[in-house]
Image (cartoon, rainbow, N blue to C red):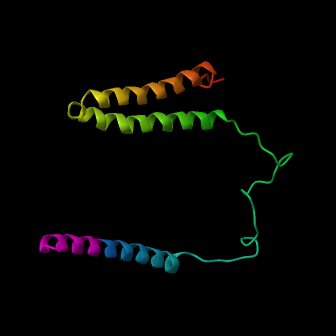
């Protein structure tokens, strides 16, 4: 192995050790400098700090999760699409067809969600 590669690994190792040392120092400082006043009330278990009102079941709106899922889906599409567009000419026509199929499948999913009324905010 040549010495340049070994020196690169040495730099990486030193930075890795410095990172671990920094985290350990921060955790130690936190433990030493934080205020500590344990009591019986602080040791009690609780869910969220709010007394339940009515029944113990809460209704959750699924549309928030659907919007988040659709956002993640199209963010992933952008992650794949932009680097592909940057080197489009090097890939050739076969890659263009493959990317068209990829975008088409995502478009079908969007059309399905649109038709089902998932994107309509009520």
Q: Quadrant of the C terminus?
A: top right
Q: Is residue 14 left or right of residue 75?
A: left
Q: Which corner quadrant of the image does residue 41 belong to?
A: bottom right
Q: Mainly helix, strand or loop, the magenta region?
A: helix
Extreme residue in the front direction: 94
Quadrant of the image occupied by residue 14: bottom left
Q: Viewed as shown, does residue 3 lie left or right of 69?
A: left
Instruction: Tell me which segment is drawn in magenta.
Output: 1-15
Q: How many numbered discs?
A: 0
Report if residue 122 lies within the magenta region: no
Residue 89 place in picture, x, y as percent: 21, 30
- Front position in the image: 72 or 56: 72
Q: Residue at x 43, y 74 (%)?
A: 26
Instruction: Give whichever of 25, 102 is nearer the camera.
Output: 102
Residue drawn at (16%, 74%) of the image: 1
Compared with residue 93, is residue 58 higher up or lower down, i.e. above or below?
below
Q: Is 28 rendered above or below residue 75?
A: below
Q: Is residue 9 left or right of residue 30?
A: left
Query: Which residue is at a point 50% across and 77% down the rendered structure image?
Result: 33
| Residue 11 location (% of width, % of height) | 22, 72
Choose between 15 and 81: the one closer to the eye.
81
Tell me if residue 2 is in the magenta stretch. yes
Give residue 90's quadrant in the image: top left
Find the residue positioned furthest to the top: 115
């Amino acid at each position: 192995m040549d010495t340049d590669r070994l020196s690169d690994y040495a730099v990486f190792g030193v930075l890795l050790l410095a990172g671990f040392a920094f985290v350990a120092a921060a955790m130690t400082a936190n433990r030493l400098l934080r205020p500590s006043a344990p009591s019986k009330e602080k040791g009690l278990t609780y869910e969220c700090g709010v007394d339940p009102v009515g029944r113990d079941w809460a209704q959750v709106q699924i549309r928030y999760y659907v919007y988040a899922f659709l956002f993640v889906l199209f963010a992933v599409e952008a992650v794949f699409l932009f680097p592909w567009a940057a080197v489009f000419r090097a890939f050739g026509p076969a890659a263009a067809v493959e990317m068209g199929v990829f975008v088409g499948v995502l478009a079908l999913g969007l059309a399905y969600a649109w038709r089902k009324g998932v994107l309509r905010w009520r």
